[in-house]
Image: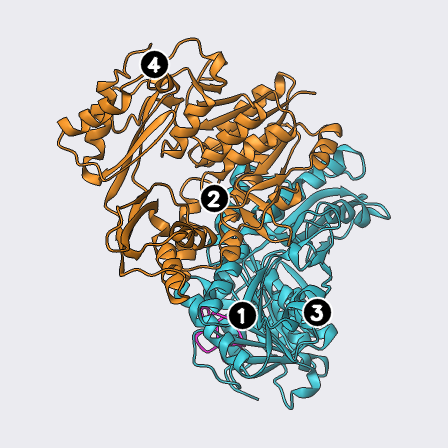
Chain colours: A cyan, B orange
């Protein structure tokens, strides 16, 4: 029997009516003969509410308790979806992460899935169950405690189930009808892509295009899971949405596939760090141990044995990063004069596999920003992307100017 | 080490401020040297919200999915309480029912606790943990699915933990400062009792005095768990609240301890039932199997081989009761002309151990209602209580008149 994975995000299950609409889509796939695994997020707003409660209770929270609290939203949706399917006479039941079990690492609040033994769910399919509804975003640690996979983790849950069950496809239903060249709320010329390569999607996702969680794309790429992003608010259509697939399956493409942006980035500078061999390790090891996701790193030229070290991280990890640095200083592992946190920045990037073989993309990028009078604070590049940190108020302007300059409104 | 169980109801954990206030009370008991097990309900309103979602999705819901959904409210509070205690530097962690594990029967939505192996929590106490915060109201079935204990089940969770851990006492923190002779919202002369016998409390609880869940009192009586009901909104005071205890520990008492009432009762009549030996069993067996909690039963005098059978059950079980009766009729197990459900009734009762040795309580009860012009629809009595069903609009009047007639505003 062929297994299909369908994932419904928070806005697609925000009300009982929307859950019913999603359940109807599941019913269509069941009628086609699939055994369906449905992965659900929390009803939209619920997870934010729970995170707010945790942060208000304890700013430097115990991540094990955070996970126990915030995972509850998905449990609610999973039960409601199973009940809705049962009302449609489709045999269904809900599963919480620990019941499957979705085995993860112990890295609470950002755990990784290690194994999904399919036996329990497969046995129920064999008994005639047609739909397994699984609470996304969560799992169980080797210690038997509840873990979560980080925001957007339900996408990763969906892809991991598709890989574990050898699913024919993983459909990600969301509130947008596919992947765009950039955020349509910022740039009205944004255009929907029919296909995008895994690598490009990976960069887009990690750069703040919030359509898919980064790790879900990594996992889909590794296990060659055909991944489709589509809207749960439009008519059903087998050709709808954007297919995320191998580079070879895309006949032609623009040099640049899209422009991504992220507001959720802070710039931190350690001022006047005593410079010595191994100083980078001494700084970034405690940050990693504190669970800070460092993104861009810039080290100034050393002067009189001291230097400034700048890095970026998600804004909600600034307090944690500061604490890790002060602790390392107290232990004598590093020495610096001060920490400056700047949350008034944004990241803007262009992404495209075509950049590999096309010269001058970086030069054009920098010229476009210079023409708009936008100062670049930090730069990083990879084979298929260029990212900069700029003052946040220029973010929309930069995205629109880059979208125009690279002619992303026109299909290749 | 002595274990103390403290249970906080929904209004006592309704906001983060109230959770902090509750945590301070826990801190005081920890400082006295207790290992504390805290049982928490969902933040007030949450469980009703979840039940509403389930009922709107599926009126005749699969109780397994109901349990998966409605148990999530307690998980949130447990995590938040553990975080609050940690912020006060008290070593604490949260436990969900399946993690303890709280082993229950498979009777979803009204499961009974069968066993609470203390090993996991005891091991953590031995490691230095001071407070185990446990999500109330929930457990795990032999099939590994989440169960709930029925509304108010967190009281039962608390008493069961007190029994399993040999606790010195079980303190039930709620929004009232003790057990009253009747509902103070209905009768302003209601008086707080310092002590009440287990048996009396049991009748009061089962008759709708919503201070404690019935099964929690049964359990406390069986395991001789000293049970204290007190307000989480008043100053801490070791003599506060009402102690629920053995009859012998109460020196003197009124003949009647209290007047209880319940709005949540429907009267159902099977009209013109074919009467034959075994007909009561044929009616009430399918009702029991459908999970309908039948309370009062009255059978009319048989005429021409047919009779009317009247019973009462909670209003939210009327649809289920009707379905069970129609199904039994369809199978030929019973035969009747129609079902009449009357949800416009209320139950009023007087309770007191002193009734055993005092004559005339029933006569006085009926005379009081007659003097107020209130018609009695159904009567049941036990050794220590008298209950009647009356039209709902007379409920307050009946309670006040009985409270006056039995002089409950005066201590004995």
| Residue A219, label in figure | 3
Name the spot of residue A108 as percent of width and height, x first.
68, 49
Chain bearing tag 4 is B
Which badge, 1 or 3, comes first in the chain's sequence? 1
Image spot of residue A105 (x, y percent): 74, 54
Chain letter of mark 1 equals A
In the figure, is residue A328 to the left or right of A18?
Answer: right
Q: In which quarter of the image is the N terminus of chain A?
A: bottom right
Residue range corresponding to the magenta coloring: A173-191
Whether residue B232 is visible here, answered yes or no, is no
Q: Which picture quadrant has residue A331?
A: top right
Which residue is at the far bottom? A251
Tell if the residue under mark 2 belongs to the same chain as the one under mark 3.
no
Would you name the residue on which mark 1 appears?
Answer: A91
For marks 4 and 3, give the CA distance. Answer: 72 Å
Give the camera-side residue of A70 and B207: B207
Q: CA gap, disc 1 to disc 4?
A: 57 Å
Q: Name the residue under label 4.
A: B254
Q: Position of residue B232 (x, y in %)?
A: 45, 25
Tag 2, which secondary structure? Answer: loop
Give the left or right position of residue A341, taking residue B390 as reference.
right
């Amino acid at each position: 029997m062929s297994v299909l994975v369908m994932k419904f995000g928070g806005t697609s299950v925000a009300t009982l009516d929307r859950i019913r609409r999603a359940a109807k889509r599941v019913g269509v796939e069941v009628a086609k003969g699939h055994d369906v695994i449905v992965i659900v997020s929390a009803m939209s707003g619920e997870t934010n509410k729970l995170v707010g409660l945790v942060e208000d209770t304890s700013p430097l929270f115990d991540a094990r308790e955070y996970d126990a609290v915030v995972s509850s939203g998905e449990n609610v949706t999973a039960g409601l979806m199973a009940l809705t399917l049962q009302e449609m006479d489709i045999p269904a039941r809900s599963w919480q992460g620990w019941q499957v079990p979705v085995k993860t690492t112990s890295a609470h609040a950002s755990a990784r899935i290690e194994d999904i033994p399919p036996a329990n769910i497969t046995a129920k399919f064999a008994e005639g169950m047609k739909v397994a509804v699984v609470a996304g975003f969560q799992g169980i640690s080797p210690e038997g405690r509840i873990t979560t996979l980080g925001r957007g983790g339900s996408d990763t849950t969906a892809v991991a189930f598709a890989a574990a069950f050898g699913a024919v496809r993983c459909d990600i239903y969301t509130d947008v009808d596919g992947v765009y060249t950039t955020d349509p709320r910022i740039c009205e010329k944004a255009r929907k892509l029919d296909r995008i390569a895994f690598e490009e999607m990976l960069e887009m996702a990690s750069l703040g295009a919030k359509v898919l969680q980064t790790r879900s794309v990594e996992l889909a790429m590794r296990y060659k899971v055909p991944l489709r992003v589509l809207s749960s608010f439009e008519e059903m259509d087998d050709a709808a949405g954007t297919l995320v697939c191998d580079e070879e399956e895309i006949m032609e493409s623009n040099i640049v596939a899209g422009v991504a942006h992220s507001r959720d980035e802070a710039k931190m500078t350690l001022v006047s760090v005593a410079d010595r061999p191994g100083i980078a390790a001494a700084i970034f090891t405690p940050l990693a141990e504190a669970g800070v996701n460092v993104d861009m790193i810039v080290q100034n030229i050393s002067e009189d044995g001291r230097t400034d070290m700048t890095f970026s991280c998600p804004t909600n990890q600034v307090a944690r990063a500061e604490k890790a640095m002060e602790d390392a200083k107290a232990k004598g592992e590093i020495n610096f004069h001060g920490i400056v946190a700047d949350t008034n920045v944004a990241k803007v990037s262009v992404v495209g596999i075509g950049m590999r073989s096309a010269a001058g993309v970086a030069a054009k990028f920098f010229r476009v920003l210079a023409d708009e009078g936008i100062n670049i604070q930090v730069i990083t590049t990879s084979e298929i992307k260029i990212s900069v940190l700029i003052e946040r108020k220029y973010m929309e302007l930069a995205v629109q100017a880059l979208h125009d300059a690279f002619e992303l409104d026109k299909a290749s």
